Amino acid sequence: MASSRSDNGFVLIVTCIVLAILLALAGLGIDIGRMYVIQSELQVFSDAAALNAALQWDGTAGSVTRAQQAASEFATGPHAMKWDLGSQPITDIKTSFDTHSVRVTVSAPAPLIFLRALLAGKAGFSTVAVSSVAVKTAGGARLIQ
């Protein structure tokens, strides 16, 4: 059974539509996967910074400054922790104190590669933010959140 020219044109149109959908899904998968990697990197930093800050904080006024410096200590120096597969420095570090705990919040503007086309007219960034809470106990510091 021979196919007509209109059948061939229909197959071409459907193939183009399916390819566009598959490329959009692949782009979505790549961007979402990248966001998870960035979130994981920031979470590791946040956990380490919260523990380091909790070790320095004893509730006194002078220890607050030491704890804030300890929280950002891992973001500086020759062996600084970075995000985006170790290529970008961590700069947005916020430290807050409760009666018994230290919270470190870290955020970064994660660039979108493929989803930028869907955000026409908007910035090609999505902010990834994570936080960790640590307390200082008699046995040392421990993460509670």
Image: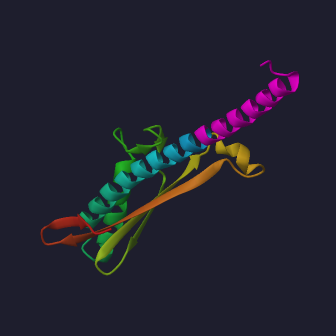
Judged left or right of residue 28, residue 82 is: left
Q: Main secondary structure of the magenta part?
A: helix
The quadrant where residue 132 appears: bottom left
Q: Position of residue 139 (x, y in %)?
A: 12, 68
In the image, 66 versus 43, the foreground residue is: 43
In percent of the image, x 66 and y 40: which residue is there?
24
In the current view of this chain or complex, which residue is farthest to the left? 139
Q: Position of residue 4 (x, y in %)?
A: 85, 22
Q: In the rendered view of the protein, which quadrant contains the C terminus?
A: bottom left
Image point 28% across, 78% down: which residue?
100
The percent coordinates of residue 137 (x first, y second) are 18, 72
Q: Is residue 6 magenta?
A: yes
Q: How is the image coloured?
A: rainbow
Q: Is residue 55 above or below residue 6?
A: below
Q: Quadrant of the N terminus?
A: top right
**Relative side of 20 to 111, left or right:** right
Residue under the point 37% across and 57% down: 46
Q: Is residue 77 above or below residue 54?
A: above
> Is 15 located above or below residue 105 in the figure?
above
Front residue of this view, candidates 6 and 54: 6
Specify whether 12 is left or right of 53. right
Residue 103 to residue 77: above or below: below
Please tell me whether residue 135 belongs to the stretch shown in magenta: no
Residue 64 falls left or right of residue 110: left
Where residue 112 sits: x, y (%)? 61, 44
Residue at horizontal 64%, vertical 37%? 22
Query: Which span is picked out in magenta?
Result: 1-26
> In the figure, residue 103 lies in which quadrant?
bottom left
Tell which of 94 and 124 is nearer to you: 124
